[in-house]
């Protein structure tokens, strides 16, 4: 486990140090604040395993989530991504009454009954769906990623701000097959201090940035 802290002053760094003292499998360090998702890149660059999971600071997962997604990628070596369902939760960890996934995503509307079945999604299908400006993958917590995919499509870029993960999802979907793993789940927590909460969904500025991210992703993947 790699943990990167941006000089937090709320007791997080002290807690992380206590955890690392008890578990030698953890490697921890501090560095400048790069925002979400740019602050994930230091850990992604340092990761040495075959698979990478981005465990964001306030989200959770089912106990079998990693186990099942690893097994799926082990069985499908032509896939760079494993993708599981997402549950939106509130500050207390309870499911929100209005769930965004899968009903409010292009994934849910395009997959139909396959939402609840294991299935392979072949490139560039998911990337092409992203041309609509809608999310196929809604949160990084839904994904287990082969390290080699980052080498192919590049890291996350801070220039797009807190919803720049859409740009990376599109690049990945254009070049990589995905295996959907329906019988587990991860979460996305929404609360007033979360980065997701302040995203200006639906505004002209938001749609303008989505268009720019689409053009950037298509250009970045053209060689593939």
Image (spheres, rainbow, N blue to C red):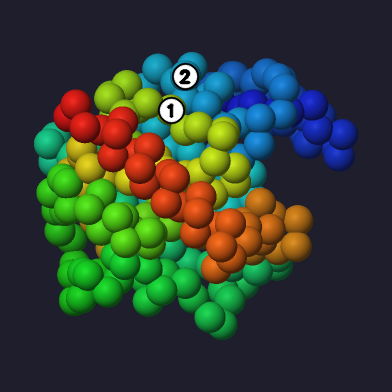
Asked if residue 40 lies left or right of residue 169, the reply is right
Residue underneath mark 1:
155
Q: In the depicted view, which residue is nearer to us: 21 or 124? A: 124
Rendered position, 44 above or below 159: above
Does label 1 or label 2 sit earlier along the sequence?
Answer: 2
Q: Is residue 29 visible?
A: yes
Dot 2 crowding, Cα within 10 Å, few <14, some 14–19, many 20+:
few
Dot 1 crowding, Cα within 10 Å, few <14, some 14–19, many 20+:
some
Q: Which residue lies most toward the bottom here? A: 97
Q: In the depicted view, which residue is nearer to us: 73 or 23? A: 73
Residue at image point 36% right, 46% down: 214
Residue at image point 28% right, 39% down: 218
Rendered position, 48 above or below 124: above
Residue 68 image point, x, y percent? 30, 49
Rendered position, 180 above or below 89: above
User: Which of the 4 image quarters holds residue 215?
Assistant: top left
Residue at image point 18% right, 60% down: 118
Q: In the depicted view, which residue is nearer to us: 25 or 12? A: 12
Residue 84 image point, x, y percent? 34, 57
Rendered position, 43 above or below 187: above
Residue underneath mark 2:
45
Query: Is disc 1 in contact with disc 2, using a CB cutoff of under 8 Å?
Result: yes
Total tally of numbered discs in the picture: 2
Q: Nearer the viewer, mark 1 or mark 2?
A: 1
Q: Quadrant of the C terminus?
A: top left
Q: In the depicted view, which residue is nearer to us: 122 or 69? A: 122
Residue 207 image point, x, y percent? 49, 59
């Amino acid at each position: 486990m790699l943990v990167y802290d941006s000089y937090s002053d709320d007791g997080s760094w002290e807690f992380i140090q206590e955890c690392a003292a008890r578990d030698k499998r953890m490697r921890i360090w501090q560095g400048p604040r790069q925002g979400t998702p740019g602050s994930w890149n230091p850990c992604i660059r340092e990761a040495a395993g075959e698979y990478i999971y981005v465990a964001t600071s306030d989200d959770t997962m089912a106990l079998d989530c990693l186990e099942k997604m690893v097994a799926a990628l082990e069985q499908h070596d032509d896939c760079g991504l494993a993708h599981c369902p997402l549950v939106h939760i509130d500050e207390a960890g309870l499911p929100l009454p209005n769930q965004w996934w899968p009903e409010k995503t292009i994934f849910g509307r395009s997959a139909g009954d396959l939402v609840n079945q294991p299935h392979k999604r072949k490139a560039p299908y998911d990337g092409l769906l992203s041309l609509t400006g809608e999310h196929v993958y809604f949160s990084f917590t839904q994904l287990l990623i082969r390290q080699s995919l980052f080498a192919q499509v590049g890291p996350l870029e801070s220039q797009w701000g807190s919803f720049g993960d859409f740009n990376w999802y599109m690049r990945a979907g254009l070049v990589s097959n995905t295996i959907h793993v329906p019988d587990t789940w991860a979460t996305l927590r929404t609360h007033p201090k979360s980065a997701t909460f302040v995203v200006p969904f639906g505004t002209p500025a938001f749609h303008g940035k989505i268009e720019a991210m689409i053009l950037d992703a298509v250009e970045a993947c053209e060689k593939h």
